[in-house]
Image: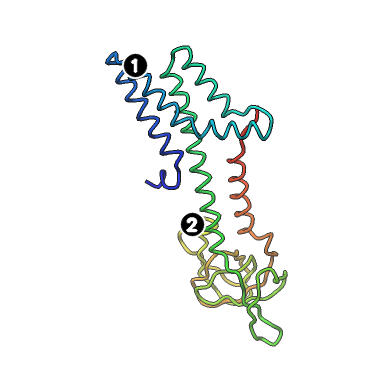
Amino acid sequence: MKLFKKNHAMIATTISGILIIIGILLTINNQTTAATIVFLLSFTIGGFKQAKEGIIDTYQNKHLNVDILMVLAAIGASIIGYWMEGALLIFIFSLSGSLEEYATNKSTEAISSLMQMQPETALRILENGETQEVSLTSLKIGDILFVPKGASIPIDGVIEDGAGLIDEAAISGEPIPIEKTSGDDVFGGTINLGEALTMKVSQEIDNTLFAKIIRLVNEAQNTSQVHNPV
């Protein structure tokens, strides 16, 4: 399953959950000692990552964080004999951390995928009518670009001449290409499926819709990695 791929925390969480089920079954059969051992294993496997991260964060930032507090709460429950409750507490917390890690990995993949869709160069039309391949960073508002059939729109702009069937799935998720003609806006990272066209640059590379999407995804990833201090 993709959920488990590159997500070791989810594997540990799953093992922890299975051990809890086994421990409950042993408890029902009055095998208390064996159940306690199984709950302890579940506790250790499910809580190791959170405990490690909590200790490191506490040492570096000089304050307790939620990871440490949850582990301490589970340890407290176990000390007074509530092994199953302690294991369940760790399992639930471990599951939330695993899902967070999965979401972070997905956002990282999304950024990589988006970056691959954006071309690195564009065909700028010179005053003599010839085209010159240039870096996107050298483009300025008002530059006229040539976009061949099947090529990616290099940057945000407006169609000057021609008509294009534009695939905007990369930025809108809409699978059906859109017919656009002279005067219509086009966006960097989308694909010209129609005939060749010319366009005028309307945004600098750092202010394109594509760049804003990448920044938002990146910010979401960074936010999900922050631990809330206590």
Where on the picture, by quarter, is residue 24? top left
The residue nearer to you, when weighing 45 against 101, is 45
Mark 1 vs mark 2, CA separation in Å: 58 Å
Q: Quadrant of the C terminus?
A: top right
Where on the picture, by quarter, is residue 118? bottom right
Q: Residues within 10 Å of mark 2 (few under 14, many from 20)?
A: few
The residue nearer to you, when weighing 209 against 53, is 53
Which residue is found at the position 37% from the left and 22% from the top? 37
Badge number at residue 33:
1
Which residue is found at the position 59% from the left and 41% from the top? 225
Badge number at residue 174:
2
The residue nearer to you, when weighing 10 against 210, is 10
In the image, residue 159 above or below residue 217: below
Indicate the position of residue 50 as horizontal and vertical percent values.
53, 32
Indicate the position of residue 93 as horizontal and vertical percent values.
49, 29
Nearer mark to the viewer, of 1 and 2: 1
Which residue is found at the position 40% from the left and 30% from the top? 16
Which residue is found at the position 52% from the left and 61% from the top? 168
**What SS does tag 1 mark?**
helix
Name the amino acid type tagged 1.
Thr
Question: In the image, 77: left or right of 24?
Answer: right
